[in-house]
Image (cartoon, grey):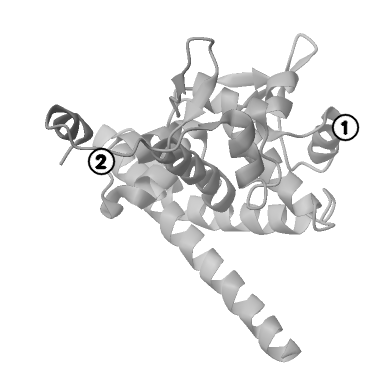
């Protein structure tokens, strides 16, 4: 029975517990140490969450709002998805069959550019940390009239790097991951490059589809191999 129907019939229905943005930060900080009021507000500005407002303008989060927020944060943290792909993941058809395609949507989709201040805000990193990431090639930008501009996905890379930094993995250590990613991308490029350069629209389209498919499978294999090595480390220590 819906809440509305229950009220019409006079049945008592418990209202969902609503929480403030500060309470949500406190609640989620154990799992997401970099959560902040400004980050939640930014996700709201981007249309990813829509908490209700009191007459005074205070945000109130229902259990469904919190569940959606947690899903967004986990997709950022665990799958490094840009926000536009997360929006598709949440609001589009939720079938698992096209999950790999969405995960690699950044290959051909348009990305807006953001400046240093916005990247630091999105990723919850300091300008000094961002400069260090750029120095070692982990985050890349283009110079436009003396201003550094970044693709939106660079904020996700910076945020992931910041989480690793809490374990003592700094920018120079990330060069190992960067090198491995570059070699993996080069292997995939060898396979699809002829099709991408083709004059035939049909062949180029097929090559892009192969690129997306290879991206998802290669990412999955890389993660499985990584976890296998980590399991071996845990077994040797036990």
Neighbours of disc 1 within 10 Å: few (<14), some (14-19), many (20+): few
The residue tagged 1 is: 128
Which of these two is toward me, 140 or 131?
131
- Residue 54: tell me if it is visible: yes
Q: Report helix, strand or loop for mark 2.
A: loop
First in sequence: mark 1 or mark 2?
2
Q: Is residue 211 left or right of residue 115?
A: left
Q: Report helix, strand or loop for mark 1.
A: helix
The residue tagged 2 is: 93
Q: Which mark is residue 165?
A: none
Q: Is residue 139 left or right of residue 114?
A: right
Residue at point 58% right, 78% down? Answer: 228
Q: Quadrant of residue 138?
A: top right
Q: Answer above or below: position of 6 versus 193.
A: above
- Location of the N terminus by quadrant is top left
Which of these two is toward me, 196 or 4?
4
Residue at point 47% right, 63% down? Answer: 220
Neighbours of disc 2 within 10 Å: few (<14), some (14-19), many (20+): few
Task: Give the x, y percent position of residue 3.
Answer: 22, 34
Task: Give the x, y percent position of residue 174.
Answer: 77, 53
Task: Give the x, y percent position of residue 164.
Answer: 74, 53
Q: CA distance from mark 1 to mark 2?
A: 40 Å
Q: Quadrant of residue 168?
A: bottom right
Task: Give the x, y percent position of residue 100.
Answer: 38, 51
Residue at point 52% right, 71% down? Answer: 224
């Amino acid at each position: 029975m819906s809440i509305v129907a229950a009220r019409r019939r006079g049945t008592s229905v418990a209202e969902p517990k609503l929480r403030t943005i500060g309470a949500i930060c406190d609640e989620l900080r154990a799992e997401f140490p970099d959560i902040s009021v400004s980050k939640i507000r930014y996700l709201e500005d981007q249309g990813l969450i829509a908490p209700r407002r009191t007459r005074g303008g205070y945000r109130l989060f229902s259990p469904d709002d919190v569940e959606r927020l947690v899903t967004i944060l986990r997709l950022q943290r665990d799958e490094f998805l840009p926000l536009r792909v997360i929006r598709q993941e949440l609001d589009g058809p939720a079938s698992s069959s096209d999950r790999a395609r969405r995960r690699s949507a950044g290959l051909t989709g348009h990305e807006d550019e953001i400046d240093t201040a916005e990247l630091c805000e999105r990723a919850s990193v300091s300008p000094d940390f961002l400069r260090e990431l750029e120095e070692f090639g982990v985050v890349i930008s283009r110079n436009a009239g003396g201003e550094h501009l970044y693709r939106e996905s660079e904020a996700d890379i910076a945020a992931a790097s910041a989480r690793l930094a809490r374990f003592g993995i700094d920018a120079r250590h990330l060069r190992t991951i960067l090198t491995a990613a570059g070699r993996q991308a080069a292997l995939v490029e060898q396979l699809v490059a002829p099709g991408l350069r083709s004059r035939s629209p049909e062949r180029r389209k097929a090559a892009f589809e192969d690129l997306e498919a290879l991206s998802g499978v290669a990412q999955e294999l890389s993660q499985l191999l990584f976890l296998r090595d980590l399991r071996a480390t845990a077994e040797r220590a036990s």
